[in-house]
Amino acid sequence: MSSPYSPATALARSFGAAGITTTQTQRVSQSFSRHLDKFAREHGKRVQDLISEGAGLARSFSSATQDHIFDQARDYWIDAGQRMVLTLDVLRERADNDAQHEAAGTPPVLIYDHEVALDGRSLVRPVNYMLLKILPPAGVVTYDWKRPYVIIDPRAGHGAGIGGFKQDSQVGVALHDGHPVYFVVFRPHPEPTQTLADVMRAEAAFIAEVHRRHPEAPKPIIVGNCQGGWATLILAAANPDITGPLVVNGAPVASWSGRLGENPMRYNGGLLGGILPALVLSDLGGGEFDGVHLVSNFEMLNPGRNYFGKYFDLYADPEKGRASFLEFERWWGGFHFMNEQEIRWIVEQLFIGNRLSRGEARIERGRQLDLKAIRSPIIVFASWGDNITPPQQALNWIVDTYADEHEIRIRGQRIIYMVHDKVGHLGIFVSSSIAKKEHTEVASTMKTIEALAPGLYEMTIDEQIGEGIAARFHVSFHERKISDILAIDDNDRSEERGFAAVARLSELGAELYDLTARPLVQSMVTDEMAKLISDAHPARLMRRGFGGDNAMTHAIRKAADEARAARTKAGPSNPFLALEPFWAKSVVQAFDVFRDVRDSLYEATFLSIYSSPLMDAIASTHAFQRVHREPKELRFLPEVQAILLGIARGGFEEAVIRMLILLADSRGSVRRDRLERSAKVLTKDEPFASLGAERRAALIREQSIIVEFEPDPAVATLAELLPDFGDRNRAIDVVEFIAGSVEDMEPNTIRTLQRLREALGLPPLALAAVSADPLTENLAVRDVA
């Protein structure tokens, strides 16, 4: 809460005096209060650190003798001059690399060898997408019977391959675990008439091709990064036969969501004219939307890093930083294009309309997308450090789609989410440390996820065992409620109504443009003009300015060769060298002050405009949530009623699965070691192995519904499922083997096991654990996970 005398409160009072509504006053006050608190906390500490560092530098200069300081100044200026020339030469190399990369068709930046498995241009409705098969490097063996991975990279202005441009990456994790890996990439320019519906159909064809190549393997795991994440959800919603697990990393699905005082990117649509800029830019591009505009938006989110910090890091050590700088910039500057139809769908259905999350998106006429139709288990990875896709945007689609966590269970869905503390947006699918830990553990989890009972879970990585490449982690799955996700959003999404007004005004603006100025603009733009406009974008000019067409670059290259030959570094104790990071920190902070003030004004402007009574009225037609059944009504769904009528029907398989679900309910969480034992029993041991994946999933869903609605009869009827005492003993032994040591059990687990034994007419729980799999004589030899 802000102080009664805080600037935020004073501003709110002035708004009230000006006749602005209470809602506007409260929201603007809360926004300013949070921004001011964050500003004071972060920048105050940074200023104190700079003062302390400056004092230390002053002492180091005052302690130096006059002759010595002169020698240090000379050494520094020689070093600094050489580093400046070497930095300029790296920028020259970047420009040359850009030119070569573009001349080669801007291929993906994958470091792995690959071959084209299926070209989207060969399909009935051609698209610029391709399916690549990753060829494992020397010493790495993959197995056709292991579950394949299909990685869909983001198409958000850049090229493809960022998910596999390092050895420690999503691709590397899967390959080293023996999985075949496929990568979905795209060419720079779309096919003339392609739509996102065509792209979705192509991706479905890619999945079918992977399954055709690996008929003995389980259904592929589909990994979607950022924009590839919502594309993955669309693919699975439109093709319910796709039942392999989905991993959705940093995907903005609920685009209106976020916290006041944070996440300024979501206000772009309301302050920049909705869909209109994208339509105008598409027309000026001759029917194609230039991805450089999206990249520029990303850069403005952190101008200190993108316009100064990364260049200073290169300048500080150009020899060491050259390779990594050029590697990343090759991807960052590989600008790609979209059709006008594609960018319009993305903006109207997702970022401004927020229709996918609310169940109203249509991939094409007559084809509505409903995320409830997805049958695949879903893992969602988000991060508090992500300034492009905050956790609310990555997770609130779950709140919008399902009435509550009970509906998730009833529909047989498994949704697991994980929220990292601090990794940035690109780090979610680029960082080596994330690949070594989170993605490795997610990959390991894929072997067991389908043994989870349906429901909503949070995955936590609790404890590290070992070091380096041998490090392993204790992973747990904790049952969660929809209210837990809402708590991430402060349990208040009332400000999202303003985005509904943006959506309506955007539609009106697009219609007005279509009927008036658009024909004129399109008639004036020639192919040559579109190319000129594209080439003249500042981001391209800045990079190309160091290219071979510039006569100065020849002198830079020559000077760089001379600098490398005569390279002399200043000593690490040189105080002038220590001045550089001090100066750089102050420059970055100046950028960050500008960014934070801009974001504060950005948000206040949006709230002042779109929280007004007029905008509230305009929003009335678009401010809706999908209609949900009341939780108590879910019991009366015909399929639920049919399952409950069969509560006493079944045998050994139904009884074991039901008892495992009852145990999981009693704990509220599942450790991965227990889940691995459960997966082993349910996939390798007879009679479960013969069920097949689909029948096994159906049984787990049926028994979950029985436990959900009739927990007491679910226990009471176990004896009817197992009339033979030999089967009862064998079944309870299987359950106790999966549950693990009695010493490690929680009290609720012990009570539940005692209750199960009593219902089956068996003796009380023994202290000695069941340490061996009771069904090992039927063990399948080969690991099919």
Image (spheres, rainbow, N blue to C red):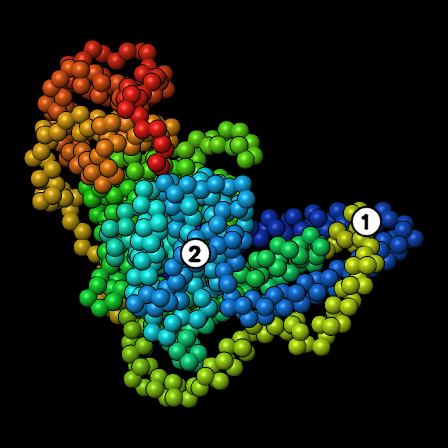
Q: Nearer the viewer, mark 2 or mark 1?
A: 2
Task: Name the residue located 80 percent from the left edge and 46 percent from the top edge.
Answer: 573
Seen in the image, is 469 located left or right of residue 523?
right
Q: Which one is nearer the viewer's eye here, 386 or 365?
A: 365
Q: Residue furthest left?
A: 645
Where is residue 733? Give x, y as percent: 26, 18
Asked whether disc 2 touches disc 1, contact meaning CB atoms under 8 Å apart, the reply is: no
At label 1, the amino acid type is Gly
Q: Secondary structure at mark 1?
A: loop
Q: Secondary structure at mark 2?
A: strand
Seen in the image, is 141 located left or right of residue 540?
left
**Residue 132: which disc?**
2
Q: Is residue 556 visible?
A: yes
Task: Name the residue located 38 percent from the left edge and 40 percent from the top edge.
Answer: 146
Where is residue 553? Give x, y as percent: 71, 72
Measure the alpha-carbon separation of dots 2 and 1.
49 Å
Where is residue 558? Give x, y as percent: 77, 68
**Residue 522: which disc?**
none
Task: Name the residue located 76 percent from the left edge and 72 percent from the top edge.
Answer: 555
Circle 1 sits on which residue?
571
- Above or below residue 756? Residue 319 is below
Indicate which disc, 2 or 1, sits on the residue closer to the N terminus: 2
